Image (spheres, rainbow, N blue to C red):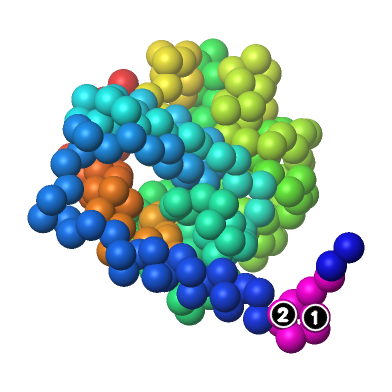
Amino acid sequence: NMVLTPWAEATRNRARRAVHEARAVLQPSTETFCARSLARLFTIRANDGFVVAFGPALIAAVADAAPDVCIRFAPKPEKTSRYLREGLVDLEIGVQSNMGPEIRLQRLFEDRFVGVVRKGHPLAKQAEIGVGDYVAWGHVVASPDGALHGSVDDALAELGTKRKIASVVPGFPTALSVALESDLIAMIPALYLLNQQVTDQVHVFELPFKSRRITVSQMWHPRMERDPGHRWLREQILAICGVGRSVMTKEPVWRLL
């Protein structure tokens, strides 16, 4: 069997990038691009919060404009640029973190976290929820990596208190389901409520402490910068997220439910 020399091993990734970039240069001009004739599979790495909030509208828009395109959403258990660098996915959507200086980035929207309990929860009867009310109940935490401590716990510690975490689940859908069937409090992104079918069963409230806002972006590798199909997909995502932004700026999502 043949094996790579040390030099070949060291330059393998560089050679792969060169090939991808050469293909990008040879892509047809955007002036001749036609979405309806595009036949392609696009893989988007995103968390379930984005998929629930914007996935249905994006899939419908793409199917209408480019019927031979398939959108595949891939799970995002950790933050890494490896999938983009190695060409395993076309786009990464999320909060930019340690993705590397070469990764292209476009801001999509800004979001914040809110508290959620079931409609019949005692907290749902209160006009205002304070820190004491918040920590008096158990919590279900959405954490892909299973972490038991996060920014919320840091914020509560600064106020001299802490919460009781009753359960840690992989994502927001499960956290919301648990909150609906218990007296636990869940914390989810506000835009996650856009396409939920259970909004009449939940009570949503502002967190009683300062929490971080999150900026969600779409990210891609430079080799896809001039790819007409890829550029078209990025434009679709930006437009769909723009609709979500306009809804949020008019009035908080839960007041529209």
Residue lying at the far front of the rendered structure: 1
**Is 237 rendered above or below residue 13?**
above
In x, y percent, where is residue 43? Answer: 48, 42
Number of callouts: 2
Mark 2 Cα-neighbour bin, 10 Å: few <14, some 14–19, many ≥20: few
Residue 75 image-quadrant placement? top right
Nearer to me, 2 or 230: 2
| In magenta stretch: residue 4 | yes
Marks 1 and 2, how far apart in space?
5 Å
Which mark, by number, is residue 125? Answer: none
The amino acid on which the numbered mark 1 sits, given as a three-letter code, is Thr
In x, y percent, where is residue 205? Answer: 44, 35
| Residue at position x 13%, y 51% in the image | 32
Residue 2 image-quadrant placement? bottom right
The amino acid on which the numbered mark 2 sits, given as a three-letter code, is Ala
Residue lying at the far right of the rendered structure: 1
Residue under numbered circle 2: 8
Which mark, by number, is residue 5? Answer: 1
Residue 59 image-quadrant placement? top left
Residue 239, can we see it? Answer: yes
**Is 19 rendered above or below residue 153?**
below
| Residue at position x 48%, y 69% in the image | 19
Magenta-drawn segment: 3-10
In x, y percent, where is residue 125? Answer: 48, 21
| Residue at position x 58%, y 78% in the image | 14
Q: Are marks 1 and 2 in contact (CB under 8 Å)?
A: yes
| Residue at position x 55%, y 65% in the image | 85
Q: Is residue 185 left or right of residue 222?
A: right
